[in-house]
Amino acid sequence: MNMINPPLRAPVLIWNVLTTTFFWTTTMRMLLKPEISGWGIFNFGGEGLTGDYWLPPLIVLFALLVFYLEGRGKFRSIYHIMIISWNLLITGAVAYGSFQSSTQVSFDTWGVNISMIWLLVPFILFLILTVALVVQETNGKYLIPCYNWSKINWKPLVMALLLFPVAFLFFRLGEGFNWYVKIAVGATIIQWILLTEVLGRPHKGKMKKSTDI
């Protein structure tokens, strides 16, 4: 009998939500609080609509497409290529940064600054889990979600939209990275989780064997 979901599906998808959250919160800061929207990843960076401002929104669109394809079941090979490519890219970036003595990971909103080498183990672990998930799906032993292309989950979409004025208000009230700004950023993090839910789990749908897709 085919199991409904591969056991690695939930942790891998949660990990990919986490690794793409930064790009959504950065995009929202660029739009709603450009004066504190400075960001940098190796040779890429910017503030507001200057520098490489196109990169965070581009990765946001890429991530939303990954979650959209994951929930539809179709074009499974494209989804597999995209999710493995993303995890290879970020793991490779972390590995490269770990061997640079001065490379730090900073999240100014929360006052966090750590050496990149501390991130290497979890990134490698979840890269392995992602590859293992793809293998699980392609060996024909599991069923995967197969929602209609036109379906989305309206309830979390409405909740995500309602958080826009909340984020805007607290960004406007805040200065620097005080608690108003922290609340605004927290609202955008919740927004991102909801948006991935909107596309990734729209409604109760059909299940298909992975070998049929």
Image (spheres, grey):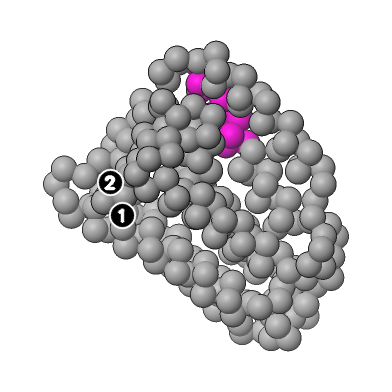
In front here: 175 or 2? 175
Q: Quadrant of residue 7?
A: bottom right
Q: Position of residue 190 (x, y in %)?
A: 63, 36
- Do residues under tags 2 and 1 come within 8 Å of each other at their CB atoms? yes
Mark 2 lies on a secondary structure that is: loop
Residue 128 located left or right of residue 42: right
Which span is picked out in magenta?
Answer: 179-190
Residue drawn 68% across the image and 43% down it? 194
Q: Which mark is residue 116?
A: 2
Q: Position of residue 24 (x, y in %)?
A: 53, 43
Q: Earlier in the sequence, mark 2 or mark 1?
A: 1
Residue 181 located left or right of residue 7: left
Q: Position of residue 80 (x, y in %)?
A: 55, 74
Residue underneath mark 1: 94
Mark 1: amino acid: Val
Q: Quadrant of residue 102?
A: top left
Mark 2: amino acid: Met
Quadrant where the image shows the N terminus? bottom right
Q: Main secondary structure of the magenta part?
A: helix
